[in-house]
Image (cartoon, rainbow, N blue to C red):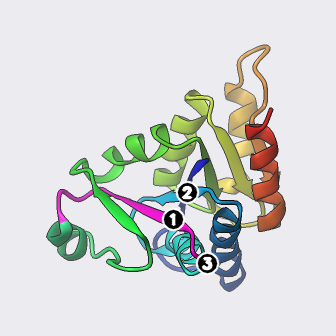
Amino acid sequence: MKIAVCGQSLPPFGKETLKKAYEIGKEIAINKHILRFGGCWGYPYEAAKGAFENNGKAMAISPAKNKEEHANFYNFPNQGYTEINYTGLGIPGRNIPLVADSDAIIVISGQIGTLNEFTIAFHKKKIIGVLEGSGGITNIVQKIAEICKKVGEEDRIVYEKEPKKLIMGLNNLNNQ
């Protein structure tokens, strides 16, 4: 699976949530999935490092049009992942290919950008993993999903506090 890790990219960050983000990336690598993220810092970057440092594939989907804009305008990282795709779409424009070209997403904390990624995934009926207890929009996405769910629609969202169980839940939904 190609799994987009979406979440809070600006401080402050919780130490425990940073650790769990890294573990999510590690579990993605162990399970031979491809991690995709917005090329930014924060929880998505920790997950990318977790995949990268455990011999997994981590792809940055940058809002920038080139390496210079990625580093100088956005001040985004230029290491800790295996490849980068420059979209030139800006923020939030890059959210569409990040989510649409992934099989699943994982939400870790987050604000408006992460909510945008969640709603794109929900609308496109992607498999969604929510790291419970990570704060931000994870505190409200279950209610949003309930309100927006269409009659007869199957629930494709996993809510889990532990990274390993979260990835196992995504695997189970993908194999159905």
Residue 34's tag is 2
Q: Tell me what residue is drawn at x 71 percent, y 24 percent.
A: 149
Give the Cα separation between the discs numbered 3 and 1. 9 Å
Is 79 situated above or below 27? below
Percent of width and height locating residue 135: 68, 65
Of labels 1 and 2, earlier in sequence is: 2
Q: Which quadrant does the C terminus fall into?
A: top right
Circle 3 sits on which residue? 54
Indicate the amino acid at tag 3.
Answer: Asn
Secondary structure at badge 1 equals strand
Give the Cα separation between the discs numbered 1 and 2. 5 Å
Q: Tell me what residue is drawn at x 25 percent, y 47 percent.
A: 89
Indicate the amino acid at tag 2.
Answer: Ile
Circle 1 sits on which residue? 57
Percent of width and height locating residue 87: 26, 50
Residue 100 belongs to the span the image colors magenta: no
Secondary structure at badge 2 equals strand
Region in magenta: 54-66
- Quarter location, residue 173: top right
Q: Tell me what residue is drawn at x 43 percent, y 72 percent.
A: 81
Percent of width and height locating residue 53: 56, 81
Residue 62 belongs to the span the image colors magenta: yes
- Quarter location, residue 25: bottom right
Of labels 2 and 3, earlier in sequence is: 2
Give the Cα separation between the discs numbered 2 and 3. 12 Å
